[in-house]
Amino acid sequence: MTVSFRDKLLEELRAEAATVPWEPRPARRPARPLVAVAGLAAAVVVAVAVVVPLMSDTPAFAVVKNSDGTVTVRINEFVRPKELEQRLGEEGVRAVIDYVPHGQTCREPRGEIVPQPDRMPLRRAEDSIDFSVDPEDFGPDETLVVQMHSANGDPVKSHGGSVGVIRGPVAPCELVPAEFSGVERE
């Protein structure tokens, strides 16, 4: 079970409050300390209200090793491609991940393309891109290559992409205008 940032913060605040010794106060209290405490409490509430929405419960990507040995990748946000490459490497899949701007693509060919019939279906969910690979399907000199295009520069929305395998070295992504049937995309 994943604990959200908000729940964790609440647990920490409760634990901290439990350590504060509470003693009865005289019936008559000066107004200034009460105002100061109220001001501090309001500042904490405002800080939590600002920070919590900025903390997303959805990670940019997820890599899951399945019981059958396959690896499922879900991309929710097109950021930190090198971290995704590293995470896939930890699961036995050498990968090159490129997120390219809207209207651009990587110059092809980037290497020797390995035919992949039905091995890596690319599925587009409501808010993510999902695909599965089997590390056993890769030869010792083969690399998974993922290229995703953001929609109008929005790192959360995809405008399409490709998943494939290249044997041997993979050329770096050299950005060129994306063309569709000889016509530049807008």
Image (tube, grey):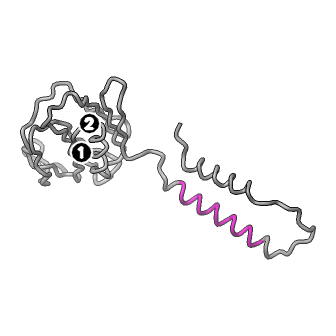
Q: Identify the residue at image location x=18%, y=41%.
A: 145
Give how far apart the Cα atoms at labels 2 and 1 are: 21 Å
Q: Is residue 64 left or right of residue 109?
A: right
Residue drawn at the location 15% of the way across and 36% of the way down: 165
Q: Position of residue 105 (x, y in %)?
A: 16, 49
Amino acid beneath label 2? Gly
Can residue 46 be found in the magenta stretch? yes
Q: Is residue 39 magenta?
A: yes
Query: Front-most of 44 and 144?
Result: 144
- Mark 1: amino acid: Met
The image quarter containing residue 147 is: top left
What residue range appears in magenta?
35-52
- Residue 12 position (above or below residue 74): below
Q: Which residue is mark 2?
A: 92
Q: Nearer the viewer, residue 124 or 52?
A: 52
Q: Residue at x 59, y 58 (%)?
A: 48
Image-based side of 52 in relation to 157, left or right: right
* Main secondary structure type of the part rendered in magenta: helix
Mark 2 packing: few (<14 Cα in 10 Å), some, or many (20+)? some
Q: Percent from the top left, x then y, of residue 167?
A: 10, 37
